[in-house]
Image (tube, rainbow, N blue to C red):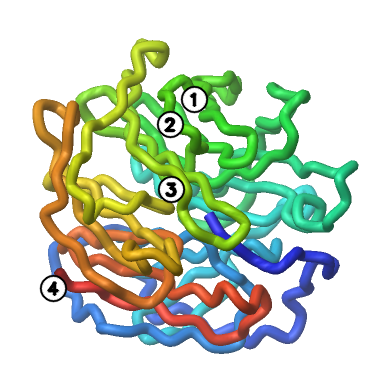
Amino acid sequence: MKRRSKMKNSLISIAGISVIALMSTACSYTSEKIAYPKVIKIEDIAQNPEGIEYDKNDHTFLLSSQNATPIIKVNLDGTFKPFTSGDKFPLSSAGLQVDYERNRLLVASFNGTELFDDNPETKGTSYLRIYNLNTGIFEKEINLSSLVPDANSYFANDVAVDKDGNVYISDWYAGLVYKVDIEGKPTVFWKNNSGIDAEPNGLDVHPDGYLLVSLVKVNDKGIYSEYGLVKILLNDPKSATNVNITDPSFTGFDGMVLTSNGNVIGVTNNQKTPGGNTLIELSGKNDWESAEVIHSKNMTASTTVAVTPENDHYVINQDFSNDFAKTWTIERIEF
């Protein structure tokens, strides 16, 4: 989720970007100790990245692009190269999910140029795009917004995958979660019936068979006006329940991720309230009937977080004032 100036510019060409070869060519993850830096500085990119994902196969970070340039692969020293290719047409990208079992990179994609053009007659589109995890070559896309033609607008925001290969995509503007099965068939999985006046944003699949979804609503000043967390059974989405979080230090999530220890780490970028720009860790109780805040750390503004196998937390610092900034940083946050 991102508050930004309206995107009236045409899609940015990647011509002229300096391409630097990847530092690592490892094909599979090993148990070797990785020296993770505190800050990774990336210069001369045209991404405006909304999403970040760690690829344990070669110890790199993947960054999405709201400016509809290719997703890039970033080494730990900040060198990078464009990764995705073969798209039928340019789309903005937001949330990313690596599906190691099926060798896929899953991407929540949307038409950013149309969505933010100030034209009430245009409302964008939402897609799931799938790329080969090894090569970055485009494999498949699924038009999601066609399922709900009467929605006011569309913004595919985050993506997650379950053990059977079903993919779940939040649409922050249409206010729902889509599901795409392993054969590529899309359906509307869940519409917000939580009673929370907010829309689905970050999400992740719990191995016990349910989806955890962050709901957040932002007013015209960029402040979270409503937020919450919902638990949705994968086999019975109509039975969705609100996770009870009474701790006032929980101030809502933009992007979020489920960690290996079963906790959820999420980003708040509620810029002008006590929540501020914060990384928060929640621990679920009674199978996520409720949750409590166990860690909270102020940080530079960000949209989401990636977690390494060693449980290091990395955020992509965000410049909400400049969609076309050229220098970005990936920062490790320690609680």
Q: Earlier in the sequence, mark 3 or mark 1?
A: 3
**Secondary structure category for the residue under label 1:** loop
Residue 143 seen by the camera = yes
Q: Residues within 10 Å of mark 1 (few under 14, many from 20)?
A: some
Q: Which residue has dot 1 on it?
A: 192
CA gap, disc 1 to disc 4?
A: 43 Å
Which residue is rendered at x = 28% and y = 63% of the image?
279
Mark linked to residue 33? 4
CA gap, disc 3 to disc 4?
A: 23 Å
Q: Nearer the viewer, mark 2 or mark 3?
A: 2
Q: Which residue has dot 3 on it?
A: 97
**Viewer-side residue, 179 vs 279:** 279
Q: Nearer the viewer, mark 4 or mark 2?
A: 2
Q: Earlier in the sequence, mark 1 or mark 4?
A: 4
Which residue is rendered at x = 38% and y = 36% of the image?
213
Q: Earlier in the sequence, mark 2 or mark 3?
A: 3
**Horizontal arrangement in the rendering, residue 119 relative to residue 48 (left or right):** right
Which residue type carries mark 1?
A: Asn
**Viewer-side residue, 264 vs 6:** 6
CA gap, disc 4 to disc 2?
A: 43 Å
Residue 153 in picture, x, y percent from top left: 73, 39
Which residue type carries mark 2?
A: Ile
